[in-house]
Image (cartoon, rainbow, N blue to C red):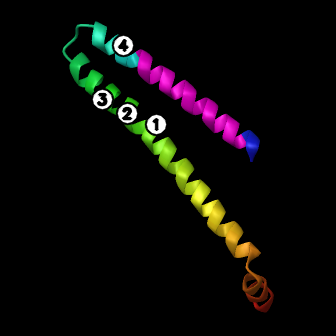
Amino acid sequence: MKKARQICALIGVILLVALYASTLVFALIDSPNSFAMLKISIYATVIIPVLIWAMGMIARLLKKNYSSFEEDPSFEEKKENE
């Protein structure tokens, strides 16, 4: 699990660095589509870290809720009855 989290974190860092670089490139080039691409790049630079944070928060909450079910004695009884 720890290895998978490290790989996901590394992918997230690489993605963010690529977004920052693309934002800089789109700001400096002069083409008809550069302004639209700049807006998309800035939007993604804000939204992607928020989504990564939200997914991590949900994963932590689900893990916490699942572990509390496993600690509940009635949970073991329900598992044995099934």
Under circle 4, the secondary element is helix
- Dot 1 amino acid type: Pro
Under circle 3, the secondary element is helix
Of the residues tagged 1 and 3, which is closer to the observer?
Answer: 1
Residue occupying image coordinates x 29% and y 7%:
28
The answer to whether residue 45 is left or right of residue 64 is left
Q: Which mark is residue 40?
A: 3
Under circle 1, the secondary element is helix
Residue occupying image coordinates x 49% and y 26%:
16
Of the residues tagged 2 and 4, which is closer to the observer?
Answer: 2
- Distance CA(mark 3)–CA(mark 4): 12 Å
- Distance CA(mark 1)–CA(mark 2): 6 Å
Q: Quadrant of the C terminus?
A: bottom right
Magenta highlight on residue 72: no
- Distance CA(mark 2)–CA(mark 4): 15 Å
The magenta span reads 4-21
Q: Residue 49 carries which label?
A: 1
- Distance CA(mark 1)–CA(mark 3): 15 Å
- Dot 4 amino acid type: Leu
- Dot 3 amino acid type: Ile
Q: Residue 32 carries which label?
A: none
The answer to whether residue 51 is left or right of residue 40 is right
Under circle 2, the secondary element is helix
Q: Residue 46 carries which label?
A: 2
Callout 1 touching callout 2 (CB < 8 Å): yes
Residue occupying image coordinates x 39% and y 29%:
45
Residue topped by disc 4: 24
Task: Examine the rendered structure and indicate whether residue 1 appears above or below residue 68.
Answer: above
Q: Which of marks 3 and 4 is nearer the N terminus?
A: 4
2, 68: nearer the viewer: 68
Of the residues tagged 3 and 2, which is closer to the observer?
Answer: 2
Numbered marks: total: 4
